Image (spheres, rainbow, N blue to C red):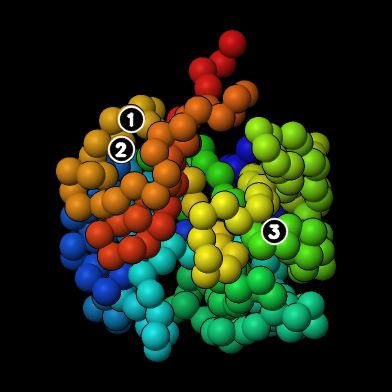
């Protein structure tokens, strides 16, 4: 289960790069009820999505040349520089070298060998997001990969993740867990064969939904588009995939009610 008890390799931050921060804030506010708080005049337009006085994620203008609007998943690391070396040794690319983010922590951004972009967070004053696995907060991350076996080997060499295969309709799904603790309790995401995109592998952020069909309607009402309509997944819940008005891809999961 994805939580805020961060350990090495667990998702600990999430942010959105957008060509129009104000419009993106309005979209996500209308869909999820999030509010926005600026990180200050020195932050170059970066700020935070918040709910109930807790930080859920970040948002800022696009900073990399040629970048498209996208959500980025950050994984916890005790040493961003050391992680960058491991990424290079395993065949990945360092897009943004490790650097300080004021007194909040250190970050670095990478591309894995399959083309999926991700980042790491080495915490200092900011430990990570403050709410997880609750309605309208991050609840799961998923790598959609053209080569799930190679992707698992890559990330295991970086973070030491454990994996367990489960049968899904028409495919095998790999459930990911951090290296320590009970494997089921430490699960936070998965790897699945690439189903819809031709552009290569991609990390997806799933936000918990109380009513997936109502969220679909809000996305459409506010200028987003549907990549996959709300669909029931046996023993998991109801999911849907979207693009926001600027093309950033995200997903929702309405978990099954406890029996």
Q: Are marks 2 and 1 in contact (CB under 8 Å)?
A: yes
State the mark number for residue 216: 2
Circle 1: is it few (<14), some (14-19), or many (20+) Cα within 10 Å? Answer: some
In the rendered image, the quadrant that contains the N terminus is: top right
Q: Quadrant of the C terminus?
A: top right
Left or right? Give the position of 83 relative to 219.
Answer: right
Viewer-side residue, 147 vs 6 = 147
Crowd rating for badge 2 (residues with CA inside 10 Å; few <14, some 14–19, many 20+): many
x then y, percent, for residue 215: 31, 36
- x then y, percent, for residue 25: 23, 58
Q: Secondary structure at mark 3?
A: loop
Residue at position x 66%, y 71% in the image: 114
**Could you tell me if residue 46 is visible in this image?**
no
Between marks 3 and 2, how big is the CA–CA gap?
Answer: 31 Å
**Is 215 placed left or right of 198 in the picture?**
left
Q: Are marks 3 and 1 in contact (CB under 8 Å)?
A: no
Residue 247 in sight in this render = yes
**Residue on which disc 3 sits:** 9
Tag 1 or tag 3, which sits nearer the N-term? 3
First along the sequence among labels 3 and 2: 3
Discs 3, 2 touching: Cβ within 8 Å: no
- On the image, which quarter does residue 23 sit in? bottom left
Q: Residue furthest top?
A: 259
């Amino acid at each position: 289960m994805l939580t805020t008890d961060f350990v090495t390799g667990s998702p600990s931050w999430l942010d959105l790069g957008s060509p129009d921060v104000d419009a993106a804030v309005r979209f996500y506010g209308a869909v999820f009820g999030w509010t926005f708080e600026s990180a200050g005049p020195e932050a170059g337009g970066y700020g935070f999505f918040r709910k109930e006085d807790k930080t859920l994620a970040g948002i800022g203008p696009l900073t990399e040349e040629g970048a498209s609007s996208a959500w980025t998943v950050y994984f916890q690391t005790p040493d961003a520089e050391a992680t960058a070396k491991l990424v290079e040794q395993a065949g990945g690319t360092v897009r943004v070298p490790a650097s300080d983010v004021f007194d909040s922590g250190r970050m670095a951004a990478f591309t894995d060998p399959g083309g999926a972009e991700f980042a790491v967070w080495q915490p200092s004053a900011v430990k990570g997001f403050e709410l997880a696995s609750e309605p309208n907060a991050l609840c799961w991350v998923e790598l959609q990969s053209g080569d799930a076996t190679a992707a698992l080997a890559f990330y295991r060499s970086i973070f030491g993740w454990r994996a367990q295969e489960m049968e899904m309709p028409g495919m095998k799904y790999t459930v990911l867990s951090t290296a320590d603790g009970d494997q089921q309790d430490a699960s936070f995401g998965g790897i699945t064969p690439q189903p819809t995109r031709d552009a290569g592998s991609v990390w997806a952020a799933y936000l918990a939904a109380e009513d997936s069909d109502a969220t679909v309607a809000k996305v459409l009402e506010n200028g987003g588009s549907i990549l996959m309509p709300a669909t029931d997944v046996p023993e998991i819940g109801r999911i849907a995939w979207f693009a926001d008005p600027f093309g950033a891809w995200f997903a929702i999961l309405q978990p099954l009610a406890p029996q």
